[in-house]
Image (cartoon, rainbow, N blue to C red):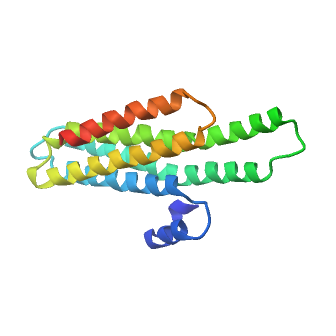
Amino acid sequence: MLTGLTFPALLEELAAPREVPGAGSALAAALATAAAVVQMAARLSPASWIDAAGVAAQAEALRERAVQLVDEDAEAYRLALEARAAADETARPEQRDWALGQVTAAAAEPPLALVRLAADLVELCAAAGERVEPRVHADVAAAAALAAAVARGARALVATNLTALTGDARVEEADRLVAAADAAARSL
């Protein structure tokens, strides 16, 4: 379980010469840190902003979900790689392709959840940006930029996992969310 590791140990796992954990786990960890920064900024702003405690709680919930995705992404990706390696070459191609497609599509779910979560965090940053204490406004803007970058990276993983499915609605959803996240982050 990656989330039980120290930060340096997590970095060592990500740097190890194997495919799992991969970029999805790294993106989830980055998103959790961005959410923590927003939580900090809201906690430092209660005197000037009545909704600060609520925003801190929202950021905490987003952070906790991002932490869960560190392990969920690694597990989904591991299962997809194992299924590819174990593909029965003697099975009818349509059966084999269907089974591999199912596992590969499942591997796209954690990155898609990351895109959604990152877009939510950027939206929270945009709402909080002008309300937090001025001394932490740049922190919120930086968290929004990081979350938007996570959304872009996770979108790339979604598209890679769903390459066989042209026009997949999940890729289109990810594209819309990335565009919205980028625009909201730039507004800060």
Quarter containing the C terminus: top left
In the depicted view, which residue is nearer to us: 8 or 167?
167
Q: Residue 11, relative to residue 28: is it above or below?
A: below
Q: Nearer the viewer, residue 137 or 52?
A: 137
Q: Is residue 142 left or right of residue 58?
A: left
Residue 153 image offset from top left, x and y in percent: 43, 48
Q: Which residue sits at x=52%, y=64%?
A: 4
Which residue is located at x 15 percent, y 50 percent?
A: 137
Give the x, y percent position of residue 118. 38, 42
Query: How many labels were placed on the picture?
Result: 0
Point out the image quarter for the N terminus.
Answer: bottom right
- Which residue is more in the foreground, 132 or 105? 105
Residue 125 pos. (x, y %): 25, 42
Residue 54 appears in the figure:
no
Question: From the viewer's perspective, is 96 left or right of 52?
Answer: right
Tell me what residue is drawn at x 48 percent, y 44 percent: 156
Q: Which quadrant of the structure image shows residue 49?
A: top left
Please say if 135 is above or below 106. Answer: below
